[in-house]
Amino acid sequence: MSHGALLAVAAGGVALLLLMIIKAKIQPFVALVVVSIGVALTAGVPAAELVATIEEGMGSTLGHIATIIALGAMIGRIIELSGGAASLAHSLMDRFGERRTPLALTAAGFLLGIPVFFEVGLIILMPIAYGVARASRKPLLVYALPMGAAMLTVHAFLPPHPGAVAAATTIGADQGWVLLFGIPVTAVVILLGYLLAKRMTRREYPMTADVYAKVFGDGDESENEPGTGPAPKAAVEGAENPPSFGMVVSLIVTPIVLILLGTIGTNFLSEGSTLRAVLTVLGAPMVALLVAAALAAYFLGARRGWSSARISEVMGSALPGVAMVILVAGAGGVFGKVLVKTGIGDAVADVLDRTGLPLLALAFAMTMLLRAVQGSTTVALVTTAGLITPLLQRTDLSPQQLALVCLAMGAGGLSVSHINDAGYWMFTRLVGLEVGDGLRTWTVLTTAMGVAGFLLTSLLWLVV
């Protein structure tokens, strides 16, 4: 099949994928698998090889990411149910002081966003923002906007979040380098987002009546409703053996430190040395997260009186929420495998190569476009990774450059969160924003932060 025909098949496949997700509201996992099968058969993959191709794409992808995502979710769940998230937020508020409470909640969103998924993090921290807004009589958006944007930034940029893990795995980027570059880039982007949000919230936006009543009204009926009522500080301080700030932060950074040590050991220690071997094992993302999960289970569970059955139940309760995310990432791997098997990947690479655009710009623009069109950060990242991998294979990029390509894709995945994004609706409903005000605040802020992330990544590209 000619390159032109292959490109037509690819364009038709992407269009069908978007149509199924946006118009027909078909679950992305099902849509990706159906489109992958259709593209494979149309592009000439023999029927006898179809199942093997799907299994190979699914297996190679999930073999890398399923354990990482599941363990990360378990750590986040233990921190959540142990009261560690609320303890972390209140400790930061104490340290930053009353005047800097919005910055404290932003920092809490950054730290908590590493092990906890965006939607879960919002549910955990929003009641605290409600309580602070009620006590200060300031608009809720002053606290919630930078806090929510911080969690979404971590979700788009950093492992162990599914989009970042899947993108790094697909293009062959080392997750240690992604973290080494990604953490400072994410921190700067979040700080810039905080400053922009501070300026944006000088204007007071109207709140829907129900949310206004929950935040500034009597609120008695909503005190015990998860995700809707304020969580007073006394509730955390009065909890039995609440986790300390240092404990929670230590558990969050443990896997990050281990992964970074593994990357440093691999690149700077002599091959065959015992220390390098130890660091390589401990620094494997799966092992690092397994160690952190065990530590979390002991320090936040067993040492606080949880039984083994309770610990097992809590860890198991994290899996249903991430199962579909894992499958979506695996289906993205199937799509990528089909692109390679059919030769579509090479055809797309030829077209992208002829555009003359830098790799970083291509990675950012493609991810941002897919994010804007279909809404999901994870789907945008895994789809772009599959499309751009053949082009990356033609270049001689260093591990550091591959990590920066991954971060540029993350910047695109952060941008343009609007009405087709479930996260947009979740945030705007929790803070009581109308659609227009949500677009003027949340969408503008996430897009500005995504562009800032891309520019920072481009600056790093010049020095690596």
Image (cartoon, rainbow, N blue to C red):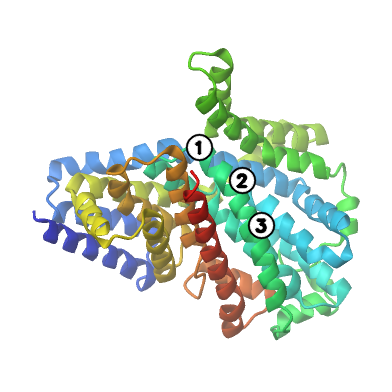
Residue 334, image x and y in percent?
31, 47
Quarter of image, res 180: top right
Return the residue at label 2.
317
Between the C-alphas of marks 2 and 3, the distance is 16 Å
Relative to 143, 446 lies left or right: left
The kind of residue on which mark 1 rests is: Thr
Q: Is residue 353 above or below residue 374?
A: above
Q: Residue at x 61, y 83 (%)?
A: 437
Q: Residues within 10 Å of mark 2 (few under 14, many from 20)?
A: some
Q: Residues within 10 Å of mark 3 (few under 14, many from 20)?
A: many
Q: Residue at x 54, y 31 (%)?
A: 263
Residue 247, image x and y in percent?
79, 39
Between the C-alphas of marks 2 and 1, the distance is 15 Å
Quarter of image, res 188: bottom right
The kind of residue on which mark 2 rests is: Ser
Total of numbered circles in the picture?
3
Return the residue at label 1.
67
Q: Is residue 265 above or below residue 300?
A: above
Front position in the image: 127 or 308: 127
Return the residue at label 3.
121
- Under circle 3, the secondary element is helix
Q: Residue at x 80, y 66 (%)?
A: 230
The kind of residue on which mark 3 rests is: Gly
In contact (CB < 8 Å): disc 2 and disc 1: no
Q: Mark 1 vs mark 3: which is more N-terminal?
A: 1
Between the C-alphas of marks 1 and 3, the distance is 21 Å
Q: Is residue 117 visible?
A: no
Residue 371, image x and y in percent?
43, 65
Front position in the image: 240 or 2: 2
Q: Mark 2 vs mark 1: which is more N-terminal?
A: 1
- Under circle 2, the secondary element is helix
Q: Mark 2 vs mark 3: which is more N-terminal?
A: 3
